[in-house]
Image (cartoon, helix red, strand yellow):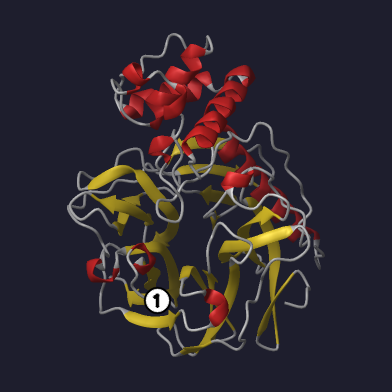
Amino acid sequence: MSHGTARPVLVVTVLVSVLVIALAACGTTPSRADRHDPVTTAAAATTPTTTATSVAGPAASLVLCLQRLGLARDVDPTLPTVELRSALRRELASRPTRTAAETCLLRSRAQDGDRSSSGDGTGSRARAETSATVPVFEGDFADPFVLQVGASFYAYATNTPLANVPFGVAQIGHHTRLDGDALPVLPAWTEPGHVWAPAVAANGDGYRLYYTTRDRASGRQCISVASATSPAGPFHDASTAPLVCQLGLGGSIDPSPIDVGGTHYLVWKNDGNCCNIPTRIWVAPLAPDGMSLAGPATALLGADQSWEHGLVEGPSMIEDHGRFYLFYSANAWDTSHYAMGYAVCDTVTGPCHEPHDGPWLATQGDLAGPGGGSAFRTSRGGTYLVFAAWSSNAVGYDHGGSRQLYVRTLQFTNGVPKLGGADR
């Protein structure tokens, strides 16, 4: 990847550090039910049947597995979830324990067929290169979202066995650090273990965390919102019901906020592929405080192209010179057919049109099934896209693959988005 100045190189280096630290200490990447199986199965197969049923949750199962290996003996697996996760983080400060934890989760995935992430990142290697075929992080890191606040960069990810919303933070000119779980407590109406695709936006003197979580009553994935005075949290969600949940359309997932001249909007996808319902990308205005919708939802895009195979998801919208670019993923996430497309919208609420009949970013060389992209702009004006992809020789968790993280510069030339100067 080439840069016009030295600053973007530093930005990417900082971002890489944030993501690596977030993975190394919080466990691993993200699971997603339906598309990405829930982390609640992680490590369960590695514990005796009689013992596994006496404790609840992936963190407890991981402790039991470690104890079978002679580690984490002082950790009580029956502790409340928040306390247990804190105790586990202390244990994972030891490299042998981190290595053992990776082994536990690998065994779980192999025995249960779990497609969730299995490593803690300790065996992976960070790279600064961001060419089309070189990931910046070789571990598993899906659904990334990056927010810059001042000189700090915050990276958030889908839930792990140790955190609802794991996050890392780095400051330009300072060492990176991990701050753990941005959302340590979920609202009572949700079911733990299904927290996906978090995204954070500044609002007034605070921050709003939008995330997907499971509604206990319906069993569907829905969108909620939490607030905090710092992007590091802890975020607090006092809701008694979802912010968005299109039950008649299968539920609602993948929230992505966008600020247009001080007015906030939320973009998301209805989770119709859960139950043979068409999937679409939606947008609605948010109230000034960002805690509720301020108007009806508008459909922006449907799965109307053959390469999409009836499914669109993971939206991310960004404005450039008065045009709104809606990036999205389509097709089956665990295959090499997964790819990204984009639409150009006249306004944030449409209308939108897709300028191409095929994908914008697709399998190429060693990179397979790219998707889950999120566009962001730095305070210096640089624009980037983060996304995940498989290696071409290991596509899908069942084949030993991982969704590795890529960062590319995003440029707009004559109204056409291009990655790192590439043709697409």
Q: Residue at x 44, y 77 (%)?
A: 260
Question: Who's the residue at 47% across and 19% down the image?
Answer: 65
Q: Amino acid at mark 1?
A: Arg
**Residue ID at (39%, 73%):** 279
Mark 1: secondary structure = strand
Residue 58 is situated, as x and y percent measured from the top left of the image, at 40, 31
To which residue does mark 1 refer? 280
Disc 1 crowd rating (10 Å Cα; few below 14, some 14-19, many 20+) is many
> Within the image, what quadrant is residue 365 found in?
bottom right
How far from the left and from the top, in percent, is residue 361? 66, 71
Residue 152, compared with residue 248, is above or below; it is above
Visible in this render: residue 27? no
Whole-percent x, y for residue 141 in the image: 58, 48
Identify which residue, 33 or 323, lies in the foreground: 33
The quadrant of the picture occupied by the N terminus is bottom right
Q: Quadrant of the C terminus?
A: bottom right
Relative to 265, say whether 123 is above or below: above
